[in-house]
Image (cartoon, helix red, strand yellow):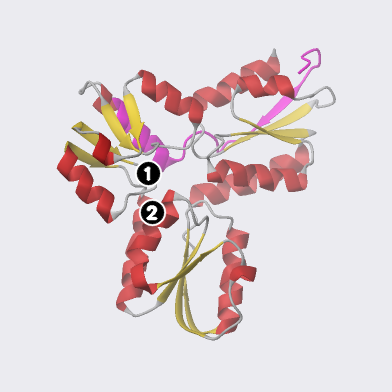
């Protein structure tokens, strides 16, 4: 990356952690000052650089609850299954739930839909922790997890309730809903996409139109960061996905005088500031 060019940066106002991730990280750091080690079920958030920083504070992610025991375990912002919660209480003295309020609201909606005998459709990534948790809540009432209306079979459906993973594209949610409205006798629709996610996507769209090129900052495993990159890439072909400042060295920004900066909801402010400093050197 060459730095002998005067640049203007358009930095998204909606950047850094979302409120749910901010809350989870804040709880973890507070506990790390009280306990020798703080364990988290899976990664507390999906950003490799931030996970590394937290590990230095002895906040350690574990995948298998059976393999550890200790004073405190944090359940992640994306939620935890019933089995995980039960096992956690057996293995750890203190189990702290940091599930995002948006996810908790969707869980409440699903439970209410089940009481009224609706089949549940979840729009999102099938393998994502959040959709796995929502799927467990839906149980036998789960009709499916979909990423596209094309995945829904051409058949007649009865009562269908629709919710989504909190970081899904609204356009994808609406596409699936439209398809089910066409095929179902009754549809109960809930837009459970996180408001912060929607605002980021709208702002990123505007920035992609204005900038010569766009830098999307996020973790490799972050679903919302990857979606944000896909969004800006469709609008501005000169868009690049970076995980940290080192990735900037692989990008030729010679012709980019006006650079847009956007980030996923699990990207820490300090990482965004590192990227900005490097770009302005």
Regarding residue 215, the answer to whether it shows in the image is yes
- Residue 227 or residue 138, whichever sits in front: 138
Image quarter (top left, top right, bottom left or bottom right) of the C terminus: top right
Q: Which residues are magenta?
A: 1-29
Q: Secondary structure at mark 1?
A: loop
Quarter location, residue 150: bottom right
Which residue was labeled with disc 1? 77
Q: Is residue 47 magenta?
A: no
Q: Residue at x 42, y 52 (%)?
A: 130
Query: What percent of the width, then of the height, locates residue 177?
Result: 56, 71
Regarding residue 268, the answer to whether it shows in the image is no
Which residue was labeled with disc 2? 103
Q: Which mark is residue 67?
A: none
Binning the other alpha carbons within 10 Å of mark 2 as few (below 14), some (14 to 19) or many (20 upward) gives many
- Residue 47 or residue 140, whichever sits in front: 140
Q: Residue at x 85, y 25 (%)?
A: 255
Image quarter (top left, top right, bottom left or bottom right) of the N terminus: top right
Residues at badges 2 and 1 in contact (C-beta under 8 Å)? yes
Query: What percent of the width, then of the height, locates residue 181?
Result: 56, 79
Query: What percent of the width, then of the height, locates residue 263?
Result: 58, 36
Q: How many tags in the picture? A: 2
Q: CA distance from mark 2 to mark 1?
A: 8 Å
Q: Is residue 169 above or below residue 92?
A: below
- Residue 153 or residue 98, whichever sits in front: 153
- Identify the residue at the far right of this view: 255
Quarter location, residue 120: bottom left
Q: Is residue 268 left or right of residue 98?
A: right
Of labels 2 and 1, earlier in sequence is 1
Q: Is residue 148 above or below residue 7?
A: below
Q: Is residue 27 magenta?
A: yes
- Identify the residue at the far front of this view: 67
């Amino acid at each position: 990356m060459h730095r002998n060019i005067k640049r203007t940066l358009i930095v998204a106002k909606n950047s850094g952690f979302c409120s749910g991730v901010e809350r989870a990280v804040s709880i973890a750091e507070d506990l790390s000052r009280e306990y020798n080690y703080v364990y988290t079920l899976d990664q507390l958030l999906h950003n490799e650089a931030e996970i590394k920083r937290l590990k230095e504070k002895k906040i350690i992610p574990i995948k298998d609850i059976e393999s550890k025991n200790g004073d405190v375990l944090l359940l992640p912002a994306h939620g935890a299954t019933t089995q995980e919660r039960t096992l956690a209480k057996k293995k750890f003295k203190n189990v702290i739930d940091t599930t995002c309020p948006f996810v908790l609201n969707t869980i409440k909606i699903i439970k209410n839909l089940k009481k009224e005998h609706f089949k549940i459709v979840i729009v999102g990534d099938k393998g994502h922790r959040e959709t796995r948790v929502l799927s467990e809540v839906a149980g036998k009432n789960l009709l499916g997890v979909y990423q596209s209306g094309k995945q829904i079979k051409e058949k007649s459906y009865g009562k269908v309730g629709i919710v989504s993973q909190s970081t899904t594209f609204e356009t994808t949610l609406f596409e699936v809903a439209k398809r089910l409205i066409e095929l179902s006798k009754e549809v109960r629709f809930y837009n459970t996409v996180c408001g912060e996610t929607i605002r980021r996507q709208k702002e990123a769209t505007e920035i992609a139109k204005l900038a010569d090129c766009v830098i999307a900052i996020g973790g490799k495993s972050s679903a919302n960061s990857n979606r944000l990159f896909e969004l800006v890439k469709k609008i501005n072909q000169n868009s690049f996905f970076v995980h940290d400042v080192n990735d900037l060295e692989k990008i030729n920004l010679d012709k980019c005088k006006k650079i847009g900066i956007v980030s996923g909801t699990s990207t820490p402010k300090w990482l965004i500031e590192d990227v900005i400093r490097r770009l302005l050197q």
